[in-house]
Image (cartoon, rainbow, N blue to C red):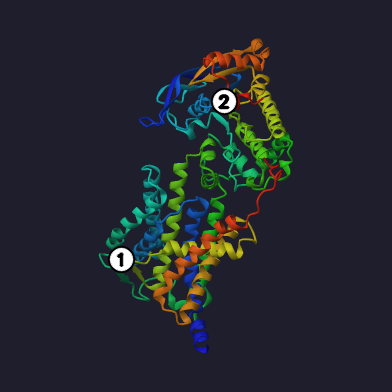
Amino acid sequence: MLKLDQIWKTFNVGTVNEKTALQGLSLELQEGDFVTVIGGNGAGKSTMLNAVAGVWPVDEGRISIDNIDVTKLPEHRRAAYLGRVFQDPMTGTAANMQIQENLALASRRGTFRFLRAGITKAEREMYQEKLKVLDLGLEDRMTSKVGLLSGGQRQALTLLMATLKKPKLLLLDEHTAALDPKTAAKVLDATDRIVGRDHLTTLMITHNMKDAIAHGNRLIMMYEGNIIYDVSGEEKKRLKVADLLAKFEQASGGEFANDRMMLT
Amino acid sequence: MLKFIGAFANAFPGACAQGLVWGIMAIGVYITYKVLDLADLTVDGTMATGGAVCIMMMMSGHSIGVSMLAAFCVGMLAGLVTGIFHTMMGIPAILAGILTQLGLYSINLQILDGKANQAMAFGKYDQLISLRWVRDVPFYQNTIFVVGIFAAVIIGVLYWFFGTELGSSIRATGNNEQMSRAQGINTNVTKVLGLMLSNGIVALSSGLLAQYQGFADVNAGRGAIVIGLAAVIIGQVIFGKISKNFAFKLLTVIFGGIIYWVVYQAVISAGMDANYMKLISALVVAIFLAVPYWKRKYLTKPVKRGGAANA
């Protein structure tokens, strides 16, 4: 479904802050794979997702989604294939627009927008049904501005927007990191339900090792712009947090997992 | 005092008419400043261009409809140039607008046949409005009525447009560019379209203003952005609480324009030297722009512990 082939990306070339964030990264996802991604700060997790989403062009390598070469497509064109949820709840929604307007924008992802109605009555009814699935009471606040919602509600809404029109690939960039544990669990639960229901191919970054083990059918660990550990199936199910920590130590040459990775 | 009342009463209808025309201009400013969240200074140029195009076309024998349409299209073209400067050449929006505005000065002079001012003989052409028609004419010929209809139609069309898929994507771009791109919106295109629409409307208003005054002037747009912003802000401060409806918001911009010119006229009637008006306008707008900042800085209560249950 997704194929990354030898991706290289360097930021701030020629300055003291030069950093090669992706170093020949290759990854292949099968249809229906739900892959969790872990790794320390600066390991290249978000950079990998942004490379797929086309936020900037990569230096080298090829990216294809469902056998379509998207390496040279700009971000808004790739959006036709992707659903994205960001770490910051403010990023994924338009604050000054209504809940239903946000959903209407999302449902037109990948279509040519012209002078047809921005939202129709039939859509409103459909959105109301879809919002009920989130179980946050948003179905009664369809005309509220999204800016009035809490961070958790906004993330749940962004998740719904990302999956409203079935994407070929769902990209979740630490989408529960900014939420309190209870809300995070709720959003993760909704994620599992939606991904399972629609059989979505998913890449989910998390800093929480327990979550990384508990969710999905495959887990990858990144270090210095590459994948250092890739585990799936039965082997993944038997994984323990201690195993991951050991793996990380081994890969990084004894350097211990940083605080952020320890948060479990 | 009596002299003031007399002078003011005399000037009042004219101030309303002028306010309506500038209110339409301010709707153009609203589209960039509020909807797209860009400060576009192109309008200081287009506010002269529209009038120049309209007057020169009328004087060369074109009908009022064709002349106004041409003004609108030339305004859109100016917006397109700023849009290209901004999106394809990476120039910050404010600077892109200033560049277009400066360039337009030469173009405006060319349109006006190299003269700084071109007057249109009254009664010779089929003009729509005039400062001579603000009283003592049948209501359907009254400039206030005609411009009012104009404004109503523009508000209606914009209300419809910003409800369409394309209009919604322009609003989304002004709200959150990153989200817009993630939802497949080409934010460069929406920005350019917004700038074009805005400048088209400003040029249309400029065409109306030139007819109203009976001449086109190369300096007609100087400080236009400030007057436009003043209208937007006055409307928002006075009527903003009443309704959040988009059409109503546009209506408040029109009211803001009228209030600006009525107050302007009152100050002039009271004996103020008209040369100071630009200074006063600038200061008033500066203070109104500062109000939201001051509110945030001095009036927000510190968040209590545990108050972040919204996280």
Left or right: residue B241 compared with residue B154: right
Give x and y (percent) for residue B26: 48, 61
Residue at horizontal 37 percent and vertical 67 percent from the top: B220
Label 2 marks a residue whose chain is A
Q: Amino acid at mark 2?
A: Leu
- State if disc 2 and disc 1 touch (CB < 8 Å): no
| Residue nearest the observer in this picture, B160 or B240 | B240
Give the structural element (helix, strand or loop) at label 2: strand
- From the top left corner, tell me how far across and down residue B136 is, in percent: 49, 82
On residue B60, which mark appears?
Answer: 1
Q: Which residue is mark 2?
A: A169
Q: Quadrant of the N terminus of chain A?
A: top right
Where in the figure is residue A163, as x and y percent of width and height? 62, 31
Res B141 seen here: no
Mark 1 crowd level (few <14, some 14–19, many ≥20, 10 Å Cα): few
Q: Height in image: A57 above or below B69? A: above
**A47 to the left or right of A147:** left
